[in-house]
């Protein structure tokens, strides 16, 4: 009787486990397909927007895990000058705030409008796109030296600069805000500014981003169209950095990519049978040093191509 009870217990356990095993077999291909779709989407993103978006996400994730204090990466010019904490000039652009709705909204802006810029007007212009972000960051650092314009983190302003330039590049694109308001792309920065005003968010980062974005657009588009002079060119060292990075494409770049990238072995190549090659070289040298008789004219009416394995001039030995 004990054996029967034990066998019945095993059968009941198998019946209970079998549905879960079947379900796992059903969901494993679906989860694999979703993982492949995510991987394909990630690899399809342009390099600069992908790098900046992922860096902002990792910075906020590290703050959420309490790996650092946000005061250690904030823009504080007193600590930059007195204690030479120069990393604050860079790290403040990668913190978009803690995990919240404003953070997700700014990350979506990078994933949508930043990617749209890099695939549209900046297509095959990776160095120019990097220079746009660098110029915006440098201009924001100069503005932050004014106490009235200072904010501890300038990443929101840099993201708003992307929105402003996108609105100028796509002025007639139709935009739906929360499925309620439909407007043209030219008015998108002003609509976002109004939303921040309604939600009670500070307006100074948005205004700084609009100012810097208009400055860049004026120097790179409006002024060259009016005067024919392009005064804000991408520096040579930006081209070198992008070429060394090896990601993206820059049309008419003055710097070529590093040819050693992706090469497993670099060295000289030699032909086989080098003894014969050297003998031929000595023969050619001897030929140039001593006069040789002119070649005999070809005979008419004879087909010289039939059965000939090698065609060339013949010379006597010792000539």
Image (spheres, helix red, strand yellow):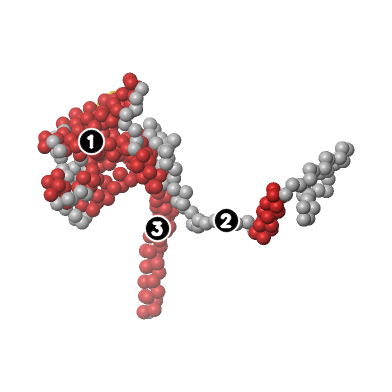
Label 2 crowding class (10 Å Cα cut-off): few <14, some 14-19, many 20+?
few
What label does residue 24 carry, if any?
A: 3
State the separation of the CA atoms marked 3 and 2.
55 Å
- Residue drawn at (40%, 56%), measured in percent from left and top? 23
Question: Which quadrant of the view contains residue 297?
Answer: top right
Instruction: Say what secondary structure mark 3 lies in.
Output: helix
Cα distance between the residues tagged 1 and 3? 54 Å
Q: Are marks 1 and 3 in contact (CB under 8 Å)?
A: no
Relative image position of residue 238 (x, y in whole percent): 35, 41
Which of the image's four quarters has the N terminus?
Answer: bottom left
| CA gap, disc 2 and disc 1 | 50 Å
Tag of residue 269: 2
Picture coordinates of residue 6, whole percent (x, y): 37, 75
Q: Earlier in the sequence, mark 3 or mark 2?
A: 3
Q: Quadrant of residue 101?
A: top left
Could you say which disc has been placed on residue 299 in the image? none
The residue positioned farthest toward the bottom in the image shown: 2
Q: Residue at x 32, y 38 (%)?
A: 131
Question: Residue at (16%, 34%) from the top-left corner?
Answer: 204
Q: Is residue 95 above or below residue 180?
A: below
């Amino acid at each position: 009787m004990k054996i029967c009870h034990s066998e019945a217990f095993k059968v009941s356990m198998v019946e209970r486990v079998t549905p879960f095993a079947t379900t796992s077999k059903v969901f494993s291909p679906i989860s694999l397909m979703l993982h492949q779709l995510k991987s394909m989407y990630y690899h399809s993103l342009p390099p600069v927007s992908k790098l900046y978006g992922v860096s902002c996400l990792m910075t906020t994730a590290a703050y959420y895990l309490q790996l650092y204090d946000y005061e250690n990466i904030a823009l504080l010019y007193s600590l930059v000058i007195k204690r030479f904490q120069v990393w604050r000039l860079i790290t403040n652009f990668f913190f978009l705030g803690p995990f919240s709705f404003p953070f997700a909204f700014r990350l979506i802006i990078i994933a949508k409008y930043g990617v749209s810029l890099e695939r549209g007007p900046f297509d095959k212009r990776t160095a120019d796109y990097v220079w746009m972000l660098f110029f915006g960051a440098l201009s924001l650092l100069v503005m932050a030296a004014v106490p009235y314009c200072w904010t501890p983190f300038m990443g929101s302003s840099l993201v708003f600069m992307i929105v402003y330039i996108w609105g100028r590049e796509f002025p007639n694109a139709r935009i739906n805000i929360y499925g309620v308001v439909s407007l043209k792309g030219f008015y998108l920065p002003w609509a976002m500014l109004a939303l921040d005003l309604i939600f009670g968010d500070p307006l100074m980062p948005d205004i700084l981003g609009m100012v810097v974005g208009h400055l860049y657009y004026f120097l790179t588009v409006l002024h060259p169209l009016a005067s024919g002079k392009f005064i804000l060119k991408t520096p040579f060292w930006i081209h070198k950095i992008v070429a060394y990075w090896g990601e993206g494409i820059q049309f008419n770049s003055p710097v070529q990519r590093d040819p050693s990238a992706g090469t497993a072995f670099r060295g000289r190549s030699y032909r086989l049978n080098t003894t014969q090659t050297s003998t031929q070289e000595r023969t050619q040298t001897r030929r140039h040093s001593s006069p040789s008789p002119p070649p005999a004219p070809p005979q008419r009416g004879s087909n010289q191509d039939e059965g000939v394995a090698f065609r060339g001039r013949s010379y006597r030995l010792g000539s």
